């Protein structure tokens, strides 16, 4: 049994102005960091391993959001927050529209700030307002994601 | 070849303690009963990609690295001691002592 | 977790996804395990999942409540109210976290009806907006459940011995985390002395990092401060901190090439063994030597 609203997205969820009839320029929503089996398994084979670096830059989002952005499975998008921007590879996954999921890791951490914890010491890893847009539509694509180990993107 | 029974996996808080681990010539060659993460961790730990001991990128001996670390911490006015989550409780005890001696702050990942 | 395995007829997973993160948790300790008083395993248990999206864990549940994010405190509060028999009017409280009150009633009734219930909660609860007050409210919920039946709550600890770090710090300082010794005695204040606010304020003038990888797991601005101060990294592996740390000390991996004590998520200490020889000393040996040398330097 599954109880829940049809649309469990955050109230802030909205789409940007349409570029074409079928695609929007960006979607504003919330980023939630999660663990994935692959992230855990590949991390334990070493954090310089290419599969780990690809996994932490893989964004899961609702298939309708993917379509709205005019993106295909595996397409690249730019995720931007108040603290940074990164390029991610998109995969459709079950979940409400307007919620985006990235594995824990250095890529997600370029979007978060240690200064914003609302007095708790916990950053906004479970709810960070972001926009997602197809790569190449904005004036700045941000840094190529992929876990360089350098945290020099503001 | 040695077969170790009831080995504890140290990856997650489940600490599954029923693993079977085969060791040959000081290398782990087989892991049974572990999950994929635990298996990868044991194999990774057995084929170490340890970074060489270094100071400012220059390779040194372990002794020199410990000396320099002690110098840095003794000189610091407000050091941060952080981590602790994947080491033994015996090592954690030493870290609390170091925090107290250096008048520092000590924290682990459960604060977030 | 022996209790969960052998007795629990109600398991609640909230804000956690053990199928992907603690892969053997279900078969060894929780929903799928067959134990002394749970010989039927999964068939004899009711399983409830609360999460913001469907996951492999929620798919294995009898009842899945898909909630809106950011509502942990509200959910714990409504369940407490229902367990305490408070009158809640459907018109006033039609839904909590986007889920109808009727579904929360079903969860509360399941708690009241069970012989032994266990709530496993993850980062979805502890890192949700409100953080510490969520955990407090979840603790009170467990107390309220114990008025009706036997009920237990357990945090799904990630790192192998993060619980040990809480245990050891509590024996020695009285506090489980975020302890500051700047006045020469232990002061405790998460949110002030936790790692992230400390680094965000740029206060530490040196850092000792042991058995964790801030380069991968802390926000970029926290890492930026660490990179600007002398940082010592002790780790068995190259990670995303060792390339830039001022001093790097390789060590034998705990539980593989170094023995010692680890605490399971339910506070049971287990001895981890040495299976192979490492060319490097253990964390304990490195830190004991470092402590002596710090002592010596401070006396000089």
Image (cartoon, rainbow, N blue to C red):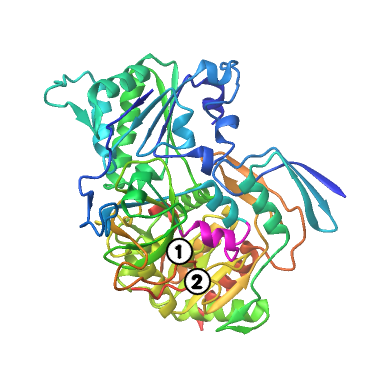
Residue at position x 38%, y 63% in the image: C195
**In this view, B102 is above or below A92:** below
Q: Do labels 1 and 2 share a chain?
A: yes
Position of residue A68 relative to residue B101, above or below, is above
- State the SS at label 1: helix
Asked if labels 2 and 1 touch by Cβ distance under 8 angstroms, the answer is yes
Residue at the spot of label 1: A106
What is the span of residues highlighted in magenta in the rendered image? A45-57
N-term mark: 1 or 2: 1
Mark 2 belongs to chain: A
**In the shown orientation, is residue C281 left or right of residue A38?**
right
Query: Please, what secondary structure does the residue beneath circle 2 have?
Result: loop
Above-or-below relation of A74 to B49 = above
Residue A95, x across and y down, in percent: 37, 41
Corner quadrant of residue C99: top left
Q: Quadrant of residue C73?
A: top left
Q: How crowded is mark 1: few (under 14 residues within 10 Å), some or many (20 or more)?
A: many
Q: Position of residue A51 (x, y in %)?
A: 58, 59
The answer, for residue B63, to whether it is visible in the render is yes
Q: In which quarter of the image is the N terminus of chain A?
A: top left
**Callout 1: residue from which chain?**
A
Residue C242 position in % (x across, y down): 55, 72
**Of residues C214 and B104, which is closer to you in this image?**
C214
Q: Which of A90 and C142 is in front in this view?
A: A90
Residue C269 highlighted magenta (yes or no): no
Residue farthest to the left, as pictured: C92
State how far apart marks 1 and 2 are (Cα). Answer: 8 Å
Q: Name the residue under label 2.
A: A148
């Amino acid at each position: 049994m599954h109880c829940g609203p049809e649309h469990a997205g955050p109230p802030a969820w909205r789409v940007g102005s349409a570029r074409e009839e079928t695609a929007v320029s960006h979607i504003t929503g919330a980023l939630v960091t999660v663990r994935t089996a692959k992230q855990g398994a590949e991390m334990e084979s070493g954090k310089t391993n290419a599969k780990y670096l690809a996994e932490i830059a893989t964004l899961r989002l609702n298939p309708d959001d993917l379509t709205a952005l005019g993106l295909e499975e595996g397409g690249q998008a730019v995720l931007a927050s108040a603290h940074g921007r990164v390029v991610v590879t998109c995969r459709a996954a079950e979940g409400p529209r307007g919620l985006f999921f990235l594995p824990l890791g250095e890529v997600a951490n370029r979007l978060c700030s240690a200064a914003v914890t609302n007095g708790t010491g916990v950053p906004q890893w479970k709810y960070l307002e972001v926009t997602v847009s197809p790569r190449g539509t904005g004036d700045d694509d941000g840094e190529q994601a992929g876990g360089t180990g350098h945290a020099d993107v503001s | 070849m040695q077969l170790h029974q009831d080995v504890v996996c140290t990856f997650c808080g489940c600490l599954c303690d029923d693993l079977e681990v085969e060791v040959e010539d000081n290398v782990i060659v087989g892991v049974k009963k572990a999950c994929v993460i635990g298996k990868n961790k044991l194999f990774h730990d057995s084929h170490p990609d340890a970074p060489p001991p270094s100071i400012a990128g220059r390779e040194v001996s372990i002794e020199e690295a410990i000396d320099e670390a002690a110098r840095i911490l003794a000189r610091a006015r407000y050091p941060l001691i952080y981590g602790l989550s994947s080491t033994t409780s015996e090592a954690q005890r030493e870290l609390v002592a170091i925090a107290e001696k250096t008048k520092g702050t000590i924290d682990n990942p459960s604060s977030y | 977790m022996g209790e969960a395995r052998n007795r629990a007829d109600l398991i609640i997973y909230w804000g956690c996804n053990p199928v992907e993160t603690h892969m053997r948790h279900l078969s060894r300790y929780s929903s799928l395990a067959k134990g002394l008083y749970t010989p039927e395993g999964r068939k004899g248990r009711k399983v409830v999942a609360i999460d913001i999206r469907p996951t492999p864990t929620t798919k294995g549940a009898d009842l899945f409540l898909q909630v809106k994010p950011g509502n942990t405190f509200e959910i714990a509060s409504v369940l407490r109210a229902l367990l305490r028999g408070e009158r809640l009017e459907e018109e006033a409280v039609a839904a909590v976290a986007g889920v109808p009150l009727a579904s929360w009633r079903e969860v509360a009734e399941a708690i009241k009806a069970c012989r032994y219930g266990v709530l496993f909660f993850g980062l979805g609860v502890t890192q949700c907006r409100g953080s510490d007050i969520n955990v407090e409210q979840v603790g009170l919920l467990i107390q309220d459940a114990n008025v009706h039946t036997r009920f237990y709550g357990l945090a799904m600890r990630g790192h192998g011995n993060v619980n040990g770090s809480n245990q050891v710090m509590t024996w020695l300082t009285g506090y489980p985390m975020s302890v500051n010794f700047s006045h020469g005695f232990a002061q405790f204040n998460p949110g002030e002395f936790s790692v992230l606010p400390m680094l965000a304020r740029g206060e530490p003038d040196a850092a000792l990092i042991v058995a964790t990888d801030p380069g991968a797991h802390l926000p970029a601005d926290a890492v930026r401060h660490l990179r600007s101060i002398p940082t010592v990294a002790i780790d068995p592996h190259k990670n995303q901190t060792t390339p830039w740390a001022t001093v790097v000390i390789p060590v034998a991996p705990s539980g593989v090439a170094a023995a010692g004590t680890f605490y399971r998520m339910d506070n049971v200490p287990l001895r981890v063994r040495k299976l192979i020889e490492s060319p490097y000393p253990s964390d304990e040996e490195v830190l004991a030597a470092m402590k002596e040398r710090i002592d010596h330097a401070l006396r000089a």
